Image (cartoon, helix red, strand yellow):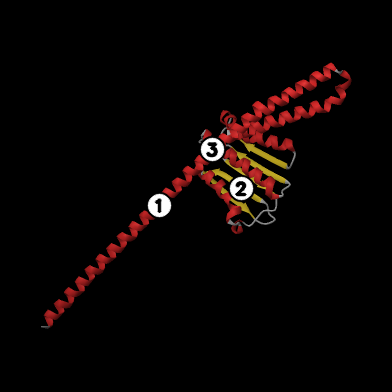
Amino acid sequence: MIDNLVIGILITIAFVSVIVLFCALLIKLYINKIRNYTRLIYEKDLQFQKTLTETILETQEQVFNNISQELHDDAGQQLTYINFLVENLKLDSPQLSETMEPVSTAVSALSQSIRRASHSLSGQLLVQQNVVKAISAEVSRLQHLGRIKILFKFEGDEPKGIDSGSQIVIYRIFQELINNILKHAQATEISIHLIANPFELTVADNGKGFDVRAVNKEEGLGLHNLKNRADIVGLDFALNSAPGKGTEVILSQK
């Protein structure tokens, strides 16, 4: 009888063990299913965000190109015509030549500024050149404006492994970084270091800086968008800043 009792206990233990093992297997399968489902949702969300960002960038680029074309074809031509009238007036009335000379100079300077702004906005011109030359030209334009001291250093002239579409995105990131500095940083100096191969762009300022960890959602949205754009074109986006220590952003090939 004792033997039967022992056998019964062993059978019960074995049966319970099988049930526990089966339940553990079911739980593991369920957890794996949840994990796969979560990963799938995450990947779809990332893909959606990437597609949405790409669509926004394409729309933005089209708007920039339209504005560039308008500046070049409309405003530029109008200023050329005005300058033509001024020069004719100076020829017809030599006594007014000295008086009209500042007007002629101002119109010519404004025409040059509009031309540079048009080139800065045009993605087509960037495609014809490359991002290194485009950034160099933009730096020259900003230095000409004289709003802030800009130190610029670059190495190489032809980026490799970056297609024309990605170069446009990089150029727009650079423009937005500069615009953020001019609007918010209260800086007196910007330092730009550009390396063509492997591509690396460092933009630093001596402004007020900020606590990266304390940036609220609204303030950090612009930085988040810049990082998303960098991710789209396969670049790392590193941000370093602290109150009173300025800000540094590094874009580099992964």
For the point 87% across and 22% down, the residue is 96
Image vertical order of residue 10 relative to residue 217, above or below: below
Query: Residue 165 in the image: x percent, y percent?
Result: 52, 35
The residue sitting at 87% across, 18% down in the picture is: 94
Pointer 3: residues within 10 angstroms few (<14), some, or many (20+)?
A: few
Query: Is 202 rendered above or below residue 28?
Result: above
Q: In the rendering, at what x and y percent does residue 128 appear? A: 57, 28
Between residues 107 and 74, which one lies in front from this camera angle? Answer: 74
Give the quadrant of residue 137: top right
Which amino acid is tagged 1?
Answer: Ile
Residue drawn at x 52%, y 37% is 58
Name the residue tied to disc 3. 59
Q: Badge 2: few (under 14), some or many (20 or more) residues near its Cα, within 10 Å?
A: some
Gap in angstroms between the C-alphas marked 3 and 1: 27 Å
- Along the viewing direction, whichever of 83 and 236 lies nearer the viewer: 83
Q: Is residue 164 above or below residue 250?
A: above
Q: Residue furthest left?
A: 1
| Distance between mark 1 and mark 2 Cα atoms | 31 Å
Residue marked by disc 1: 41
> How far across and how far down the image is residue 155, in percent?
62, 36
Residue under label 2, please give it: 249
